[in-house]
Image (cartoon, rainbow, N blue to C red):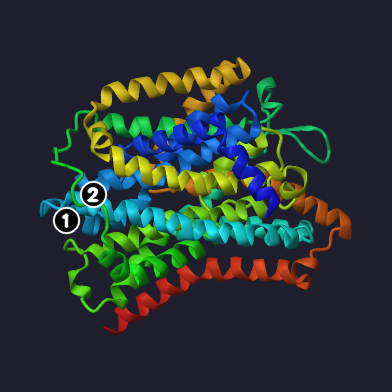
């Protein structure tokens, strides 16, 4: 309890509080503009945090994470254009409410739901993270290797497109980690004669290229698109006491669903909102109203996608395993600041671990205040011409990457990965498994080699150690489940 209070006291000081406030505000604005994702914002900010204090850098990024997920509901509600995939389900009922002239009500429900989901998942984060970290300290290399395997397989099987494409993307990401120095033998590998590759591909050029630059290329195609304007005021945004009592079961159920889905590696906020929306519809006495501007639909979607953020932070700070693509980038931020994500974080750097927890709490409070007060003004950002935004973002990408290591090689890598990311998305190959594969590849390689060296080359502990066997079983089930679904679907079609 005392470390949490110390962290909260530090966070309420002027500089840290200002950084969280800035992060949340930027996240809301960027998340609310279609085409500018939270992932892009955090990857672009990473180079700027290079010389910052580690705690301040991480709480700034957590603020952006909270703000970006919440802010995406603005464009989803007003324009039927979700700022992030997590708000896709919000468009089903939020936009019809806007068409009925109830945009303020839709935004008020969404903002309140985001706040409730964030607070409930914070309670789970604060309660579960410390004991999880103590349990994870007992894990050996086989447990860590199978956890990485589980995260990659689950994300590949549940992301957009086919299972095969997801696995190919994950393997491609792991392959890009290979050039450089072999960590065991100490010799160079797959450098093809390029001296610049001897230190391997840096994390920042890969992340910014795959997400930010590829998104810029994609947005250039629709650069002249002009969204329709919607009228918006502040009346009717606050919920009454009757609303709170009427929607309380929905708030609680969706918060629990979002938190639990967030804890599972590789699933993400979009799956959480879809599952929560489906459960709310199944539990409703009026399921036919969902998709026509039904208020419980907005609450279910927005509560779950924000609760999933707190849930995803649990495996991030306790196991070093990302629950989503953004979490993979946050792991990259920890590594960039010479911090080791995982169970030892609570022992060696407790100020970072508890900083994440308290920043998530304070970030949700700030998010609620900013959204309620300034959403009318933030909504106007939706109509800024894309040509101005895209040119500025690309300029900052180039400057940020070059400034980190004064290397034009990194700039070329960033642009090349931008083209690769653009082509992958056009081919319906998900970027999530690709990036998580790149981030987790060194962990998987190190732990697998360590395990094999300790057993003289035997893989028997994969099946005899309880947690390793459980993680391996989940990986196999995650791999087989889509195949089983496809087989059952073919049987139903054949028998019809």
Residue 409, percent across and down? 58, 19
Compared across the picture, whether 469 is left or right of 372 comes to: right
Query: Are circles 1 and 2 on residues that touch, CB within 8 Å?
Result: yes
- For mark 2, what is the residue? 77
The answer to whether 42 is drawn above or below residue 486 in the figure is: above
The answer to whether 225 is drawn above or below residue 140 in the figure is: above
Q: In this view of the protein, can residue 419 be seen by the observer?
A: no
Compared across the picture, whether 11 is left or right of 100 comes to: right
Image quadrant where residue 180 sits: top right
Front residue of 409/270: it is: 270
Front residue of 148/190: it is: 148
Q: In this view of the protein, can residue 330 be seen by the observer?
A: yes
Residue at position x 46%, y 35% in the image = 21
Distance CA(mark 1)–CA(mark 2): 8 Å
Q: Secondary structure at mark 2?
A: helix
Labelled disc at residue 201: none
Image quarter where the C terminus lies is: bottom left
Residue at position x 72%, y 42% in the image = 340
- For mark 1, what is the residue? 97
Front residue of 179/193: it is: 179
Residue at position x 79%, y 59% in the image = 140
Compared across the picture, whether 489 is left or right of 172 comes to: left
Residue 410, percent across and down? 57, 22
Q: Secondary structure at mark 1?
A: helix
Front residue of 372/322: it is: 372
Residue 164, percent across and down? 48, 57
Give the residue at the far left of this rendering: 100
Identify the mark nearer the N-term, 1 or 2: 2
Q: Label 1 crowding class (10 Å Cα cut-off): few <14, some 14-19, many 20+?
A: many
């Amino acid at each position: 309890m005392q470390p949490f209070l110390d962290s909260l006291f530090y966070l309420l000081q002027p500089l840290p509080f200002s950084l969280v406030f800035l992060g949340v505000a930027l996240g809301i604005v960027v998340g609310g503009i279609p085409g500018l994702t939270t992932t892009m914002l955090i990857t672009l900010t990473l180079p700027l945090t290079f010389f910052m204090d580690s705690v301040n850098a991480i709480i700034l990024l957590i603020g952006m994470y909270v703000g970006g997920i919440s802010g995406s509901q603005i464009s989803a509600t007003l324009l039927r254009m979700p700022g992030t995939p997590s708000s896709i389900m919000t468009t089903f009922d939020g936009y019809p409410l806007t068409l009925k002239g109830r945009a303020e009500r839709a935004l008020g429900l969404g903002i309140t739901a985001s706040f409730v989901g964030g607070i409930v998942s914070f309670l789970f984060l604060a309660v579960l993270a410390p004991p999880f970290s103590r349990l994870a300290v007992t894990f050996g290399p086989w447990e860590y290797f199978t956890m990485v395997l589980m995260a990659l397989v689950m994300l590949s099987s549940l992301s957009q497109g086919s299972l095969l494409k997801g696995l190919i993307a994950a393997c491609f990401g792991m392959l890009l980690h290979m050039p450089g120095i072999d960590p065991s033998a100490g010799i160079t590998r797959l450098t093809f004669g390029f001296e610049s590759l001897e230190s391997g591909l840096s994390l920042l050029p890969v992340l910014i290229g795959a997400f930010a630059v590829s998104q810029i290329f994609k947005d250039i195609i629709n650069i002249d698109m002009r969204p329709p304007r919607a009228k918006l005021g502040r009346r009717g945004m606050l919920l009454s006491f009757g609303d709170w009592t009427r929607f309380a079961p929905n708030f609680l159920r969706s918060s629990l669903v979002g938190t639990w889905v967030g804890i599972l590696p590789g699933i993400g906020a979009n799956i959480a909102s879809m599952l929560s929306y489906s459960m709310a519809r199944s539990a409703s006495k009026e399921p036919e109203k969902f998709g026509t501007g039904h208020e419980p639909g907005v609450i279910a979607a927005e509560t779950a996608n924000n609760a999933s953020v707190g849930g995803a932070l649990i495996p991030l700070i306790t196991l070093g395993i990302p629950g989503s693509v953004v979490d993979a980038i946050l792991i990259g931020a920890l590594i960039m600041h010479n911090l080791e994500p995982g169970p030892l974080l609570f022992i060696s750097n407790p100020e970072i671990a508890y900083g994440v927890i308290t920043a998530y709490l304070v970030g949700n409070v700030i998010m609620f205040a900013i959204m309620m007060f300034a959403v009318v003004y933030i909504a106007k950002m939706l109509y800024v011409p894309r040509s101005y935004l895209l040119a500025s973002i690309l300029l900052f990408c180039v400057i940020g990457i070059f400034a980190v290591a004064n290397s034009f090689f990194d700039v070329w890598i960033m642009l090349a990965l931008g083209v690769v990311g653009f082509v992958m998305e056009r081919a319906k190959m998900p970027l999530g498994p690709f990036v998580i594969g790149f981030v987790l590849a060194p962990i998987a390689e190190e732990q697998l080699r360590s395990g094999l060296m300790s057993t003289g080359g035997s893989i028997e502990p994969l099946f005899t150690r309880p947690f390793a066997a459980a993680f391996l079983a989940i990986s196999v089930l995650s791999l087989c489940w889509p195949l089983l679904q496809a087989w059952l679907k073919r049987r139903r079609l054949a028998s019809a």
